[in-house]
Every structure is written in C-alpha cells, then in structure tokens.
Amino acid sequence: MSTLASFKRAIPKRKYRERGQLERRKHLGLLEKKKDYKARAIDYHKKEDKLTKLRTQARLRNPDEFYFRMINSKMEVYISLFKVNLNLYFAFTRMVDMLILNKKTMMKILKEQRN
C-alpha cells in the first residue's frame, strides 16, 4: 500500500485551468477569474480595514487636545496660498484689461478704415 501512495505522488498532477468566456457572453465584458476576484477582494478588505481604523481613531480622539503648532502651521500655509492666489488674480486682471484695451483700439482702427 505504501508503494502505491508514493507512486501516486510521483506522477505530476494536471494544472488547474478555468473555463474561458463563452462567445455569446463576450458583450458582457471580461470574465473575472478566481485570481482576479481574490486580488480585488484583498484590496477591498485592506481599504475597509484602513477605514475602520481611521474611524476608531477619530472616535477616540480627544476634542480638548490642543497644540499651538496646530494653528501656526496652518496659518503659514494659508497665508502663502493667499499671496500666491492674490498674485495670480492681479496678473489675470492685468491680462484682461490689456485684452479689453487691445479690442477697443482695434475697433477704433476698423471704424476709421471704414469711414
């Protein structure tokens, strides 16, 4: 009996293969195989675990906790962003004003040429 068992193990097994998608179901899109499903499920569960961890952290957070750096660091970022946005706004308004002036001068020139 033991020789038969070792003989069975010596013969390589046929590799597992999943069926392909039927021709009449091609319009439904790609057929998801087990390895595809497994990868998608693992990714989904990782994201789910991360969300639950973040929810518990938010629930356990102390609302009375305060550090001065919380305010100071945010203010520096907002001030620099405000300055950048302000410079962009001024550049944009200058450009629009120039376009309006160019349009008015062009209209004036065209009117003179018609007369």
Image (cartoon, rainbow, N blue to C red):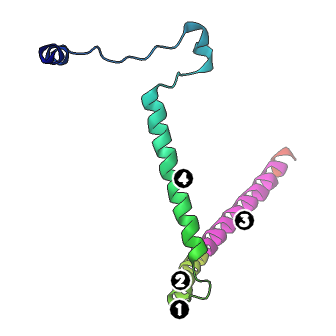
Residue drawn 28% across and 13% down? Answer: 14
The amino acid on which the numbered mark 4 sits, given as a three-letter code, is: Glu
**Residue at the outermost bottom position:** 68
> Regarding mark 1 in the picture, which secondary structure is present there?
helix
- Viewer-side label of 4, 2: 4
Residue numbers of the magenta segment: 84-111
Q: Residue furthest right?
A: 115
Q: Position of residue 49 (x, y in %)?
A: 51, 56
Q: Which residue is mark 2?
A: 76
**Mark 1 burial class by Cα count in 10 Å: few <14, some 14-19, many 20+:** few
Residue drawn at x 80%, y 52% as measured from the top left: 107
Q: Earlier in the sequence, mark 1 or mark 2?
A: 1
Residue 34 vertical position relative to residue 54 in the rendered view, above or below = above
Mark seen at residue 68:
1
* Real-space CA distance between mark 1 and mark 4, rounded to the nearest whole angstrom: 33 Å
- Lower sequence index among marks 2 and 3: 2
From the viewer's perspective, is 17 left or right of 6? Answer: right
Residue mark closest to the camera, 2 vs 3: 2
Q: Which residue is mark 3?
A: 97
Instruction: Using the numbered discs, state the Cα–Cα distance from disc 2 to disc 3 in whole angstroms.
Output: 32 Å
Q: Are marks 2 and 3 in contact (CB under 8 Å)?
A: no
Give the CA distance from mark 1 to mark 2: 13 Å
Residue wearing tag 4: 48
Which numbered disc, 4 or 2, marks the residue that appears first in the sequence?
4
First-in-chain label (1 vs 4): 4
Q: Is disc 1 in contact with disc 4, using a CB cutoff of under 8 Å?
A: no
